[in-house]
Amino acid sequence: MPFMPFQILGFWLRGLLAAAMLVAGPLLLKYWYDHRHVEVRTQVLAPVDDETRRLDRDVEAPVVVRREDWRFGLNRETAALLGGLALIGLSIGGGSFAYPLLLKRGRREDEPDDSLRGQMRRLRRPDGTDLYVELYGPEDGPPIVLTHGWGADAAEWCYAKRELGDAHRLILWDLPGLGRSSQPTGRDYSLEKMARDLDAVVGLAGDAPVTLLGHSIGGMIILTYCRLFPEALGTRVSGLVLAQTTYTNPVKTTSHAAFYTAVQKPLIEPLLHLTIALAPLVRAMNVLSYLNGSAHRSTHKDSFSGNETRGQLDFMARYMPKGPPAVLARGMFGMLRYDATDTLASIPVPALIVPGGRDPVLLPSASAKMAEAIPGATLLELEGAKHAGLFEYHARFADAVRRFVAATAVAPGSRR
């Protein structure tokens, strides 16, 4: 699932809950183990003679102590045993068994499959980043450069390869620090740095003008690219596809934006710093979140409309433990400083804006504003979709991209 800065709150809440479950389970089992033998104390009433009665003496009855084995039933020991086993079971298997079983198993063609492979390239950048790039599809097809969401990798485009790769030249890349791309030595995860990386990837298309397609932070990187490389628009770039993205700091264009904006400085940013400082711990908590199913629940809530398959949900939930927490946090800092509002009106190429109709992560209203501000923009809402709408409704999305590229692509060797 692509990650936004405000979702760092969920990182920590899910992680701390997962850690608490993993600790509480063994503690309950220890309580059961320590009490599996029960001591029963019984007072034995001894006969009292006449002299004792005459002197009105109190006689303490002797106590007999015997040990009995614990028995399964309505008692604290049974509750501790069952509770401990349940917490440990949920901690290590809830994601695999509990939540995904509630979803339908899709047809084979509906399940995500990243086994398709194209030509693999490595791009060495001046800051030390080694970018992984994959070229897929016919060399003479209209080129599309695909930029994935934050925390994901190029595998997010597995449906695009299957549905667009027969007639288009797809150029997919992993953002720095994610997937098979290395981390920059200077720890620069600003959107400006990623836009310059995108420019290098665009160069792999040769003379053919490309369509830039971006999801979530991918769209933000594209708009930053438009600001930094305006001369490329209409020459090296023939069109833009911006899917489930925003034009400004995403904290301001999400649901409950007023709350998140208020807590950005006092809560979100300190938690991002803490995530960087405690990255190994956060990664362990993210692994537990995936194993116990809370990552699946969060992904379902934010990214899917309820029509996803088990495979689609698990595919996106797996990004939770995969992403390096320090990398994710630094990229989130970059998004907090992002604003492309003034760039929109100066974009001279056609743009297809694709919001998810029910996206709670980046609201459709942000896409509507982009569509109004970009002169050649078209708004196409994926009705019912959330933040992973291009993944859940992949056939509809691919068809929209296909038609857009057919209408806007420039033949190889020509310039606008």
Image (spheres, rainbow, N blue to C red):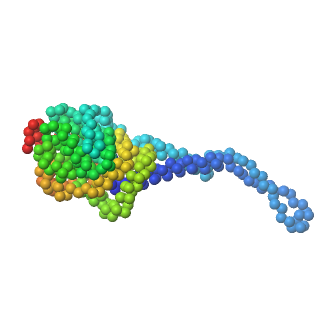
Q: Position of residue 167 (x, y in %)?
A: 17, 34
Identified at 15% across, 37% down, the residue is 206
Q: Is residue 386 visible?
A: no
Q: Is residue 393 left or right of residue 266?
A: left
Quadrant location of residue 321?
top left
Query: Which is more toward the observer, 148 or 44?
Result: 148
Quadrant in the picture for the C terminus:
top left
Q: Position of residue 277 (x, y in %)?
A: 41, 53
Above or below residue 76? Residue 54 is below
Query: Which is more toward the observer, 383 or 365?
Result: 365
Q: Position of residue 54 (x, y in %)?
A: 90, 67
Q: Is residue 347 left or right of residue 112?
A: left
Q: Position of residue 232 (x, y in %)?
A: 14, 46
Identified at 22% across, 44% down, the residue is 198
Above or below residue 12? Residue 184 is above
Q: Is residue 200 visible?
A: yes
Residue that extends furthest to the right in the rendered view of this protein: 51
Identified at 74% across, 53% down, the residue is 41
Quadrant location of residue 309?
top left
Q: Is residue 386 left or right of residue 19?
A: left
